[in-house]
Image (cartoon, rainbow, N blue to C red):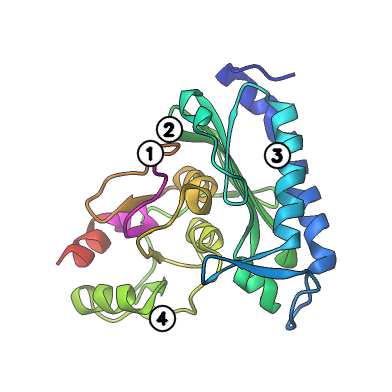
């Protein structure tokens, strides 16, 4: 099966897509649209929810993906961190349920997020939103798709005002310096917020500080391959699989709009 060679990425992609779908199928029996989850719920620390579905999906994905590519390291929100990942050129970066709070409350905006990172950059990303029946995927240099349809952001962009989703303080900052915006509801799953920039339904996605690798790695590649950019406010792109896999405030936007939008956030 796949080796550590980058040439193995195309052969991995269908299996990773299937793994994401199977994980979503595992989660759906616990999900109750508009109502509290059927899963047992507890909290990590004081405010971070986790459910038995998160753990079940994490266990399945770790076993399945590690079997597909045994040489790759592992980094997941629901697995104790193993510093051995830092010695690996390839690492799986996974959030079994991105948007656990939404999942637990019956909101449909949650997703299974899987990225394969090589030397700090994602080369394969799959994001599956079971409640919406939408599967996003991308391979480095080969494009991005949603449910088999190619994603490609237009070069010219929309007529303003831009549609913006993110935390209110960041949206306020953007509007002060960029002019009027159309405020969309904040998407609880950060990965889906970024993916919706890639599919053109959001023009600017804003991200609070302290996003973790597993929140953004898969969606970062999907956005990049669709013709968009995810950067910190200094313009730098994310590097993944660092000792402290946490990021600052970020902006996701079509490439042609990036200079104007990031300029407004810096003003």
Q: Nearer the viewer, mark 4 or mark 1?
A: 1
- Contact check, label 2 and label 1, Cβ < 8 Å: yes
Tell me, for residue 239, which label it has, or none. 1
Residue 69: x and y in percent read 68, 25
Q: Earlier in the sequence, mark 4 or mark 1?
A: 4
Tell me, for residue 62, which label it has, or none. 3
Q: Earlier in the sequence, mark 2 or mark 4?
A: 2
Count residues near mark 3 (Cα–Cα under 10 Å), then give few for <14, some for 14-19, many for 20+.
Answer: some
- As for residue 248 lying within the magenta part, the answer is yes
Instruction: Residue at 47%, 23% (x, y): give it.
Output: 87
- As for residue 209 lying within the magenta part, the answer is no
Mark 1 lies on a secondary structure that is loop
Measured in 3D between alpha carbons, the distance from the residue under mark 4 to the one under mark 3, in whole angstroms, is 37 Å
Instruction: Give, as a single range, the part of the protein colored magenta.
Output: 243-258
User: In this rendering, is residue 193 above or below 16?
Assistant: below
Q: Earlier in the sequence, mark 4 or mark 3?
A: 3
């Amino acid at each position: 099966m796949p080796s550590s060679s980058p040439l193995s990425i195309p052969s991995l992609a269908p299996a990773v897509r299937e793994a994401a779908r199977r994980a979503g199928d595992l989660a759906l029996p616990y999900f109750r649209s508009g109502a509290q989850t059927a899963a047992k719920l507890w909290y990590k620390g004081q405010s971070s929810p986790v459910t038995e579905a998160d753990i079940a999906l994490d266990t399945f994905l770790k076993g399945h993906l590690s079997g597909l590519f045994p040489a790759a390291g592992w980094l997941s929100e629901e697995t104790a961190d193993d510093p051995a990942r830092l010695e690996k050129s390839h690492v799986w970066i996974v959030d079994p349920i991105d948007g656990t709070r939404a999942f637990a409350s019956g909101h449909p905006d949650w997703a299974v997020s899987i990225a394969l990172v090589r030397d700090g950059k994602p080369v394969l990303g799959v994001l599956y939103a079971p409640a919406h029946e939408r599967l996003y995927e991308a391979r480095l240099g080969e494009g991005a798709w949603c449910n088999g349809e190619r994603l490609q952001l237009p070069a010219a962009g929309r007529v303003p005002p831009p549609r913006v989703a993110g935390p209110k303080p960041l949206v306020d900052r953007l509007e002060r310096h960029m002019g009027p915006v159309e405020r969309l509801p904040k998407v609880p799953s950060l990965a889906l917020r970024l993916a919706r920039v890639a599919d053109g339904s959001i023009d600017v996605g804003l991200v609070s500080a302290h996003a973790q690798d597993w929140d953004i790695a898969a969606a970062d590649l999907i956005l990049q391959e669709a013709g968009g950019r995810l950067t910190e406010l200094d313009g730098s792109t994310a590097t993944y699989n660092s000792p402290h896999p946490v990021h600052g405030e970020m902006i996701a936007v079509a490439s042609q709009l990036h200079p104007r939008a990031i300029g407004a956030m810096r003003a």
